[in-house]
Image (cartoon, grey):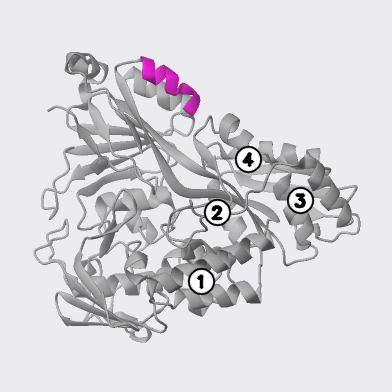
């Protein structure tokens, strides 16, 4: 991470003059707005970041995505399928109710019962759970169907609710008997209007108005370190220009993702500072490798050229990743040749570099029988990833240069994600961040097996027995060294298949008032808790 603070006392008064109303309220301009206050609605970074203000999980992750205690103070495994979590005592929800193991069980039941969950992401995190027992109010024993070496990391993604938000009898992890719940399960709309948005986190929801603002107030009964800001106001501003203009005008104290091209301007203005943090988020394309015909690609005979590995490799070779990272991302990205940055758990130390070579790409297309190209629609978001629509246009240009007649269909994420989940695309943009290599391969590349939570985002239909065998074995291997080696073998096989085209790893930039320090995060979450005044 690179920090550029402007902690100059002589300028403090000037900086405060920029934003006189900001005293105890942190005003944040978001580049991508959460789609709900319901923490179990959709696994998206903006949603997860908002949830982190209001709720806690049993396990948390720090700025570098390392596991740290939260509502669980310790955990251990018996070497096989049983995990025991020791829960924190003395924790209260923001409505005053004490936190106990029953709330955790209630939460996992709600995740399993939540039919509004988009794409099943939250359900996937708990699908391997078979029994959950609470021998006492502060001990939770989870038994999984198969060994789950990553269970603590999976549980870091589940925000804990209070069981007091609905009527119930004795809470048990018995889905067939509704877990003891006798009232209605809380709905997305109830979370969004705030009546059930109750957590143990550092802030409480004051209001959520989609497209307008999210307001939070400090939870004074919070068990952890008290956040500095009494109140937080988050405003969605999807265009980088107005976000920066708002910061300069004093409308905001902290903004997400200013354009990298504007960093020189910020560097010259002593009223402001910025933070650049590498992230684990890979931007990639997912190819339909399973269907012929496929909805948005066709050759002269109406077939699907993407089913040919030579075509897939050629498309990858046709894209100039370096140019996109430098020109489209303004240097705020690193070209990607695997699905997690080198050095993280289970990654390849030297992934094969896919060099930009349009001549070789044309030759390979010709060998595959596509000397005259084919027609392709590239599907992408235009409001989710950094410069996503511009990236899509650039990639389409590269593919057109090697004879693939490519057009772009970019749309808002609210439309894009449900359509992608229905497999309406053939060549689709994606973005995914994780802390170790199995995550991407498990959900995106493994053959679909809902019972094992494999392939639940495998919208391209990849099914490769050799890869499946490696990733399946890795996912139940408790020995870290052996699991890492299996993941490297699986990663090598996945790259050979070219069913995905990794493009780049995003870096994340936050700009802020000079009298604020901001700790950037690899998960790209924007947290009010990470913003602290340099002087009070």
Structural distance between the alpha carbons of marks 2 and 3: 21 Å
Structural distance between the alpha carbons of marks 3 and 1: 28 Å
| In this rendering, the label closer to the viewer, 3 or 1 | 1
- Say what secondary structure mark 3 lies in: helix
Q: How many marks?
A: 4
Pointer 2 residue: 350
| In this rendering, the label closer to the viewer, 2 or 1 | 2
Check disc 1: other Cα within 10 Å, few if <14, some if 14-19, many if 20+: many
Q: Which disc number belongs to residue 321?
A: 4
Q: Quadrant of residue 101?
A: bottom left
Q: Magenta residues?
A: 260-268
Give the percent coordinates (x, y) of residue 13. Answer: 18, 15
Residue lying farthest to the left in this orientation: 90
Structural distance between the alpha carbons of marks 4 and 3: 14 Å
Which one is in front, 209 or 157? 157
Pointer 1 residue: 486
Residue at point 25% right, 38% down?
A: 232
Structural distance between the alpha carbons of marks 1 and 4: 28 Å
Pointer 3 residue: 314
> Are the residues flagged by discs 4 and 3 in contact, CB closer than 8 Å?
no
Query: Which badge, 4 or 3, is on the more N-terminal residue?
Result: 3
């Amino acid at each position: 991470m690179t920090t550029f603070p402007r902690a100059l006392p002589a300028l403090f008064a000037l900086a405060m003059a920029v934003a006189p109303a900001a005293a105890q309220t942190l005003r944040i301009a978001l580049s991508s707005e959460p789609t709900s206050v319901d923490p179990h609605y959709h696994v998206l970074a903006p949603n997860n970041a908002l949830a982190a203000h209001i709720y806690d999980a049993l396990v948390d992750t720090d700025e570098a995505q390392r596991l740290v205690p939260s509502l669980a103070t310790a955990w251990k495994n018996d070497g096989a399928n049983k995990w025991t979590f020791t829960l924190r005592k003395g924790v209260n929800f923001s409505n005053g109710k004490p936190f106990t193991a029953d709330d955790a069980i209630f939460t996992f039941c709600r995740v399993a019962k939540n039919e509004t969950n988009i794409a099943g992401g939250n359900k996937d995190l708990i699908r391997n759970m078979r029994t959950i027992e609470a021998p006492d109010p502060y001990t939770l024993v989870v038994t999984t169907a198969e060994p789950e070496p990553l269970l603590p990391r999976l549980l870091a993604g589940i925000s804990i609710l209070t069981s007091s938000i609905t009527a119930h009898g004795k809470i048990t992890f018995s889905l067939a008997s509704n877990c003891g719940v006798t009232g209605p399960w809380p709905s997305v709309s109830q979370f969004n209007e705030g009546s059930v948005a109750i957590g143990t986190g550092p802030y409480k929801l004051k209001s959520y108005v989609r497209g307008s603002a999210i307001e939070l107030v400090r939870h004074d009964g919070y068990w952890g370190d008290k956040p500095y800001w009494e109140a937080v106001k988050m405003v969605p501003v999807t265009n980088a220009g107005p976000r920066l203009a708002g910061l300069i005008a004093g409308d905001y104290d902290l903004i997400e993702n200013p354009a990298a091209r504007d960093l020189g301007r910020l560097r010259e203005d002593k009223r402001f500072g910025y933070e650049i943090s590498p992230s684990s988020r890979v931007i990639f394309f997912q190819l339909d490798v399973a269907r012929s015909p496929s909805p948005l690609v066709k050759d002269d005979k109406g077939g699907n050229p993407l089913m040919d590995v030579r075509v897939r490799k050629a498309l990858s070779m046709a894209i100039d990743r370096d140019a996109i990272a430098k020109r489209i991302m303004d240097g705020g990205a690193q070209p990607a040749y695997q699905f997690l940055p080198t050095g993280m758990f289970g990654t390849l130390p030297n992934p094969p570099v896919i060099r930009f070579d349009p001549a070789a790409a044309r030759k390979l297309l010709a060998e595959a029988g596509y000397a005259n190209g084919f027609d392709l629609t590239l599907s992408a978001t235009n409001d989710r990833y950094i410069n996503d629509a511009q990236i899509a246009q650039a990639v389409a240009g590269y593919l057109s240069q090697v004879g693939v007649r490519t057009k772009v269909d970019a749309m808002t994420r609210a439309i894009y994600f449900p359509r992608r989940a229905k497999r309406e695309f053939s060549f689709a943009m994606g973005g995914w961040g994780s802390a170790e290599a199995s995550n991407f391969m498990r959900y995106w590349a493994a053959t679909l097996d809902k019972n094992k939570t494999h392939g639940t985002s495998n919208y391209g239909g990849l099914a490769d027995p050799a890869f499946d065998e490696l990733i399946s074995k890795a996912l139940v291997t408790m020995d870290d060294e052996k699991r890492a080696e299996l993941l490297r073998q699986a990663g090598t096989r996945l790259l050979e298949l070219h069913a995905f085209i990794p493009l780049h790893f995003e870096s994340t930039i936050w700009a802020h008032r000079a009298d604020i320090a901001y700790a950037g995060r690899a998960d790209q979450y924007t947290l009010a808790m990470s913003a602290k005044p340099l002087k009070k």
